[in-house]
Image (tube, rainbow, N blue to C red):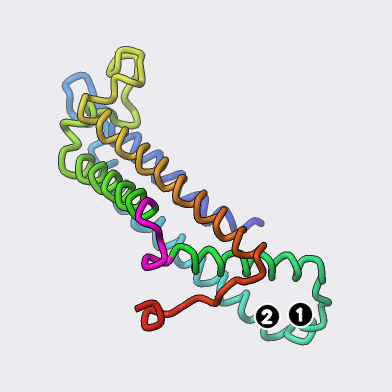
Amino acid sequence: TVPVIFLIFPTCLMGALIYMASLDDDSGNPAVPWAGTAATITASATALVQFGSMIVAAYYLEQAVESRKEEVEAIEIDKEVKDLDDREAHLRQCYTTITQWPRLPMLSKLVLLCSVTCITGSCYLVQFFSALCFVEHTLTDSIGENLGGNVANLFLPLGWVATGLFLASMLLLAVFIGWGNRQAKKLVASDNATPILNDEQLS
């Protein structure tokens, strides 16, 4: 586990430099002028290290699988686990079949469309009108000083609208997924689960 330090160190250094870059002296100028540039460089280095670690891990994992292929294949498959995996795969297949757009009842389509509309509206508000949605607040700002001690003061009226649209979208999506799961379980229980149809068959 010692090599993990090469992942942790640049991340911690980046966080420290970002904090240092946010500090101002009595005249309002940056207390550590070079910290902002160093933080940007360190962030790039951190991204490289993280990406490189995934590549290295994938390489050695593949090498281990290839060099010990016989040992891996000799491991006995747990029948109970396999049966459970097969049932879950069959349930997912039934869910996919049930939730294909041409098969959906009108009410389910309406719920899904409303969910998409809400999340799209929320994203547009936050992305293009963020200054009208939230009070400017950085990681190093004080909640007591900047927000009057109340986190809810971070939200402007339009921010509450964006948050409401997001929550409405999640709720509608949960309703749709719940309906799909119930229908999929009924399809499994009926023992008449039809295979997933392609676009040509559905049309």
Q: Where does residue 64 sit, x and y in percent of width and height?
A: 68, 79
Q: Is residue 150 above or below residue 167?
A: above
Q: Quadrant of residue 192?
A: bottom right
Q: Secondary structure at mark 1?
A: helix
* Residue drawn at the location 20% of the way across and 30% of the way down: 158
Q: Mark 2 falls on what kind of element?
A: helix
Identify residue type, mark 1: Val
Residue 82 falls within the magenta-colored stretch: no
Quarter of the figure with the C terminus: bottom left
Q: Position of residue 138 (x, y in %)?
A: 29, 31
Q: Residue at 56% across / 73% down in the picture?
A: 58
Visible residue check, residue 42:
no
Looking at the magenta stretch, what is its main secondary structure?
A: helix
Q: What residue type is disc 2 on?
A: Val
Q: Is residue 88 visible?
A: yes
Q: Which residues are magenta?
A: 100-107
- Mark linked to residue 65: 2
Please state which of residues 45 and 154 is positioned toward the viewer in this rendering.
Answer: 154
Is 26 drawn above or below residue 3 in the view shown? above
Answer whether labels 2 and 1 touch (C-beta < 8 Å): yes
Residue that badge 1 annotates: 72
The crowding category of the residue bearing disc 1, from other C-alpha atoms within 10 Å (few below 14, some 14 to 19, many at least 20), is few
Going from N to C along the chain, the mark reached first, 2 or 1, is: 2
Q: Quarter of the image holding residue 15?
A: top left
Q: Nearer the viewer, residue 14 or 138?
A: 138
Determine whether 2 is above or below 174 in the image. below
Rounded to the nearest angstrom, the CA distance separating label 2 from label 1 is 7 Å
